[in-house]
Image (cartoon, rainbow, N blue to C red):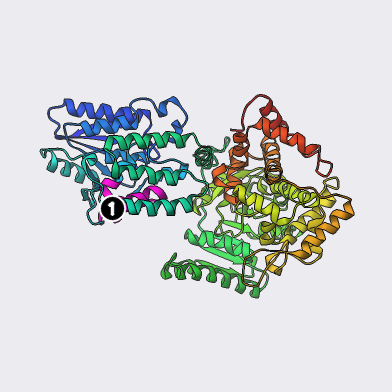
Amino acid sequence: MTATYQTRGDVAVITLDNPPVNGLGYDSRVGVVTGLERALDDAAVKAVVITGAGKAFSGGADIREFGTPKAIAEPNLLSVILALEASSKPVVAAVHSVAMGGGLELALGCHYRVTAPGAQIAMPEVKIGLIPGAGGTQRLPRVLGLETALNMIVKGDPVSSEVLARLPGQKLFDRVIEGDLLDGAIAFAREVADKRPLPLVRHLKVEHLDAQAYLQFARNTVGAMAKNYPAPPKCVDAVAASTTMKFDDGLNHERELFVNLMLTPECKALRHAFMAERATTKIPDVPADTPVREVKKLAVIGAGTMGGGIAMNFLNAGIPVVMLETKQEALDRGVATIRKNYEAQVKKGKLKADKYEQRMALLGTTLDYAALKDADMVIEAVFEDMAVKEQVFKALDEVMKPGAILATNTSTLDVNRIAAFTKRPQDVIGTHFFSPANVMKLLEVVRGEKTAKDVLATVMALGKKIRKTCVVSGVCDGFIGNRMIEQYSRQAGFLLEEGCTPQQVDKAVERFGFAMGPFRMGDLAGNDVGWYIRKRRYVEKPNLRYSKTADLLCEMGRFGQKTQAGWYDYVAGKRDAIPSRLVEDMIVKHRAELGITPRKISDEEIVQRLVYALVNEGARIVEEGIALRASDIDMVYLTGYGFPLHRGGPMNYADTVGLFNVVQAMKRFAKNPHDDANFWQPAPLLARLAAEGKTFS
């Protein structure tokens, strides 16, 4: 049962019990209605309390039922709320921990609401491209006022129950209960058991001095900020209905907007991302109950930008870190950078001064490997060179205690080779952080062929603790993200040779929705990083063709923002990318040397070649088992590479376009004499799915 029924004297208690967040799935909805009917039929029951078991009142819809007939089967949530409103006995919602989305709408359908302090209250539907669909846009403004309700619905962020309970004139909560919530709710239910008429939120008026003027201001503001997302403006439209329409007409208007949004590609993409993020934690041969190793102390090798950023993640989570370097000056620089980062947060009010000092107190430094002997895990973040990695891992193998986890932050190198430098390959794993490591959400967890299951489970759990989106990758050159971005970058280079400028390519991709085009991204990351990798590729893969423009750029010493010159020119202290005449002349000269007559290339072709390059390589990665599923690739690109969220990631975007159409475009690109015809042969998985009319999802 996902909803239980019991009586406490003259009060019936209906408890949602559908872990982890008491989602309002079909069985839960039936349980609420059935429990209510029992209470109404029992003459001894004077009032009803609805609450949630465990760590939530209710987190809303049960995501496990998304897309199934159960999601819309009667009683749907609207029907459940109507039943609560129609109850002849008072119904009290006892809210605690989490009341979000449909869970909050359920509470708003009750006659009364009491809450425990610290409950997180939200209408987060906008984050998956929707608006509340069970009366939330009509009821929340009636209990919190127009401005507070609209802000909550448009932003989707949680607000604590005690903050809301303190708002002047609020009618969301009738009482904040300290101590045992259920006991307090039952006592409150007895207080109101005989009061009539029973209060209904639908009978309240939306309070505001000048609603229409405020709504026009909101439309202008939200419209400017929403850009590629249709849901936020529709939130305003739905809430506006609460000020001008009769309640039931407002409900119908909300429902119409909700259903229309459900069909938009943006909503489908956001729902895909929501589900994909949860899927990343599921590893077929590593059950959820796999025992994990204790990590109470962490070591980081390297105090550079990456090492310092990695250390900050763990300091933020309250885990002591010892940082090792070869020279004291390097350690001092690393610690100074960490301090500077924290001080910037304190200055902006994002971090309290005492928290900053607590975190810094957890940081230790050393020049001696022997000082790492008590650490439960070590993460190596040194120069991307196999000989350097070998030195480090042999030293770690000597000093680290048995059972300690040895992790490498390599972005491209063979984790199996690195593991072989030790006598404990089962304890070695890849933890590929993205720069800046203390900010970027993605963590590629690279599973070596001998990595123990409990090591993988431990690192996945630790990643969650430091608030990363962890995606498991097998071992290959570049893992998931960098292996794919190489093909994207190759296409960008070929486009320059064929007639594009760096700014034309960047602008086309940024209009598509990327945070940054390939050339601005190269300048930010450092063009010398790619140059170093290409030099290795020329030896390892002599038949793989690259445009020479990037090498010529580096030979000019133009490594990007750090040298104030890359694909663009830069002014000290500013991030503005200024088109460079010098670079354009270099490209024109190189094009002439190749004997290529430049042609006009459309933005559509630019986007297709770059994005479909990701898709084709992604399909190979899935087929090889490097990625567990196509949606994992989408999460890598959404959280680590600036792929537009409203498109759901490269694999989801390909599904949206239609895999048949993707393959047809690839066949056209293969005929281009200046491109790589071999690369544009569709990956076997992509070709098979397209032929069968299927999708990656």
Quadrant of residue 618 in the image?
Answer: top right
Quadrant of residue 683 in the image?
Answer: top right
Q: Indicate the position of residue 76 as horizontal and vertical percent values.
A: 35, 29
Say whether residue 552 is left or right of residue 504.
Answer: right
Q: Nearer the viewer, residue 258 or 6?
A: 258
Overall secondary structure of the magenta stretch? helix
Secondary structure of residue under mark 1:
loop
Q: Residue at x 47, y 42 (%)?
A: 128
Q: Indicate the position of residue 524 as horizontal and vertical percent values.
A: 66, 61
Where's the N terminus, which quadrant?
top left
Q: Nearer the viewer, residue 9 or 299?
A: 9
Disc 1: which residue:
117
Say whether residue 250 is left or right of residue 298.
Answer: left
Magenta stretch contains residue 161: yes
Say whether residue 503 is left or right of residue 201.
Answer: right
Quadrant of residue 231 in the image?
Answer: top left
Magenta extent: 141-166
Magenta stretch contains residue 514: no
**In this view of the protein, can residue 429 be seen by the observer?**
no
Q: Indicate the position of residue 199 as horizontal and vertical percent values.
A: 18, 40
Q: Is residue 385 above or below residue 274?
A: below
The three-letter amino acid code for the residue at tag 1 is Pro
Q: Is residue 671 above or below residue 371?
A: above
